[in-house]
Image (cartoon, grey):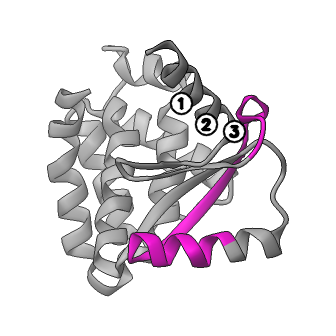
Amino acid sequence: MAELATIARPYAEALFESAGAAAAALKPQLAGLATLAASPELRRFADDPQVTAAQVFDVVGGAAQSQGLALDAKVANLLRAVIDNGRVAALPEIAAQYAGLVNDAGGVSDAVVQSAFPVAPEQLAGVLAALEQRFGRRLNARVEVLPELIGGVRVVVGDEVLDTSVKARLEQMKAALIS
């Protein structure tokens, strides 16, 4: 959603600039808050006109603590600003944009490796080495198992997709036979 991205950008950039060298350390805290903010119950509570911003902050802060998240002062200030401005729904997008800023600064990209079967750690290391050479940057990989791929892997890095799955090859063969 473009509007949410537009709303989230200044918050993510402000936190990134204020965090300085500690930017990477704040990424998990923001991701945890984004997970909490994705809850429909929390969003309804935050949107209730009878609930004050301080009450919303206390609930979110308490929920974060119960999940083992100790919020840094900068993240707590961001959370207060987001709640005060009625932008709790934007927290997941803020976290995503912040993660992108941290990754860009470190020369790293997030990658999703989709495979038809579970990937052993030593296999993943070999695949990552080849992918890092192919994409020209370090990758933080997350593996998803998708049996419908039949075999092979599909890798998504940002807006780039490398699909070597059996499913993709079968679809290419089907297209070639039909045309």
Q: Residue 166, which numbered label?
A: 3
| Label annotation for residue 36 | none
Residue at the (71%, 35%) spot, across then down: 149
Q: Does the image show residue 59?
A: no
- Tell me which segment is drawn in magenta: 127-151
How packed is label 3: few (under 14 Cα within 10 Å), some, or many (20 or more)? some
> For the residues marked 3 and 2, what is the alpha-carbon distance in whole angstroms?
5 Å
Q: Residues within 10 Å of mark 1 (few under 14, many from 20)?
A: few
Q: Residue at x 14, y 51 (%)?
A: 10
Report whether residue 50 is seen.
yes
Compared with residue 73, is residue 7 higher up or lower down, i.e. above or below?
above
Height in image: 90 above or below 72? Answer: above
**Where in the figure is residue 140, as x and y percent of width and height?**
54, 68
CB-based contact (under 8 Å), mark 2 and mark 1: yes
Residue type at the position of mark 1: Gln
On whether residue 126 falls in the magenta region, the answer is no
6 or 38: nearer the eye? 6
Name which of mark 3 and mark 1 comes first in the sequence: 3
Q: Which residue is mark 1?
A: 172
Query: Is the Cβ of the residue at disc 3 closer than 8 Å to that at disc 2?
Result: yes
Give the structural element (helix, strand or loop) at label 3. Answer: helix
Element marked by disc 2: helix
How far apart, in angstroms, are the residues tagged by discs 3 and 1? 10 Å
Residue placed most toward the observer, 6 or 72: 6
Q: Residue at x 31, y 35 (%)?
A: 90
Q: Which mark is residue 169?
A: 2
